[in-house]
Image (cartoon, grey):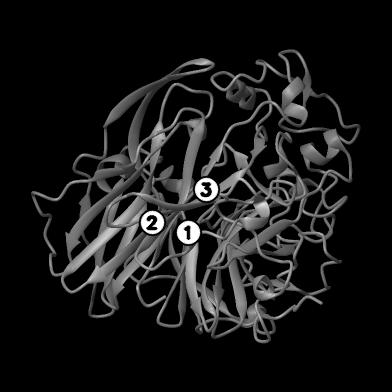
Amino acid sequence: MYATTRAIRPTWLLAGCSLVAIVSSANPADAKAAPFLKPNSLVISSSTYDNTQGAVADLQAGDSLPSASIAATCQPFSTAVAGNDYVNVWNNVLADPSFGVTSAITLTDVDARTGSTISTLSIPSDQVVTSFSSKSELGLHVENAWYGPVLSFVGYGGAGVGALDASNADAVDGQDPTNPVTCFFGDTYAFPRTIVSVGADGGVAYTPTIAYGGDNGRSAFYSPDADTYYAVGNSNNGDTSSYGQGITNPDVTETTGLEVVNPLDWPTFNYGTIPSGNSAQVDPMYASVAGQKAGKDSNFRGLTEYNGALYFTKGSGSNGIDTVYTVTPGLPSLGDAGSASVSIVPGFPTDSAKSTGGDYTPFAVFFANATTMYVSDEGAGDTTDQSTHAGLEKWSLVNGTWQLDYVLTNNLIGTTYTLNGYDGAWPTVTTVGLRNLTGDVKGNRVKLWATTSTNSAAGDPGADPNEVVEITDKLSDTTLPTKEAFAVVSAPNYGSVYRGVAYVSSGQ
């Protein structure tokens, strides 16, 4: 009944596969799908912490949790330092570095001109969820296929709301015996990192993968020309270096970084068995920098495509090189992924994160044209990063090399706010940079939207209620303008986080 390739027909156009975005009728049978992915709209992904479901509902201080490292006997475990209230639960990361709580995913389609909400779509939480407070998840992309716009992102298949440590669990059963999460919860505690696609009617389809075991998928998009998904993320939460290569199955060091994925587009994440060879890694980089942990060189998080080429970023962790990358040649296929080559975009940093301590933390990329690139920087690195890169960078291509023109920070870096809610006051939040990014170009005007990166005294800043902001820049400018400033599109909400943004152009 269900198509398994977009070249034939998209899954959500088939009977029984469509979801209603907004139900306004008292009788669900009379409900109609609200418009979604409407031209000139901005789609925002968000999630809200929920401690009433799953394992977190019973979490109390003193409970056992996975530890940072567990010997072959699976001992010792760590001890939870806090219960499940929103303000304090994240302190458990001090005892359990893998700590996280799965939460439901909401997509909001906003009029990009007025900021008013057009429609809201809740992704079925019995299918796919995200991990609160994994700040690099839920990057969004909208691409135009022959049947209309397609929105894509990555989540966890089958984890449900309230599961603990899913973002560091295996992707398939028994994948990594050295993973503390696997050791604690058991071999079957595994969740396929699943690419989710959403159509203009709000219909949802799922492509589960075996990739990113032990960590998270961050961003994915669909290429209509190649009929292929491309995804970025990280892997390897265990201690494979102590046991040698080949201990994990599938190998966590070769199912990570930039992945090429054949679309399955199932009506449920577990509609069948993931076919063998359905995804492939492009250019494993774990040997590129001496002394690095296997697989962590490819700790990618931002992803985009421009003029038939892929661009992606690495901006966290102490392994590899934090910079902007591209693939040669062009868009790799599933069959030739292994022969494609990853390289640093000319002009961007080439020094290792281990040697610098993180003086550059790029997150996402947006091309205004072939010679103008905007890069968001999280500002979570050292003082050099905070003073030189944090915010929105504008780069120009000059004689084949990219050069940094300026960094937009006005009314962004250093802004603060406080929030109160059901579990008490959240610590004061300070904006320190930007994460996911999107934009729209009209003539000499470039309008850009991004989610903010924050810091606070909370146990995990990734749980900070953050913002969606916008700014308008002149395409022709190469020196820092004095009057441009960020404005808030979506204000912070207690207990919630914004993750991804994607602009739907009028051509889609």
**Residue under the image location 30 percent in, 66 percent down:** 440
Residue of label 3: 136
Amino acid type at mark 1:
Gly
Residue 484's mark?
A: none
Residue 472 at x, y = what percent? 20, 57
Residue 247 left/right relative to 427: right
Residue 140 at x, y = what percent? 50, 59
Amino acid type at mark 2:
Leu
Q: Quadrant of the N terminus?
A: bottom right
Q: Quarter of the image holding residue 433?
A: top left
User: Is residue 161 in view from this perspective?
Assistant: yes
The secondary element bearing badge 3 is classed as loop
**Residue under the image location 65 percent in, 49 percent down:** 27
Residue of label 2: 437
Mark 1 in CB contact with mark 2 (< 8 angstroms): yes
Mark 2 in CB contact with mark 3 (< 8 angstroms): no
Residue 406 left/right relative to 500: left
The secondary element bearing badge 2 is classed as strand
Most foreground residue, 454 or 503: 503
Amino acid type at mark 3:
Ser
Sooner in the amino-acid sequence: mark 3 or mark 1: 3
Q: Quarter of the image holding residue 161?
A: top right
Q: Residues within 10 Å of mark 3 (few under 14, many from 20)?
A: many
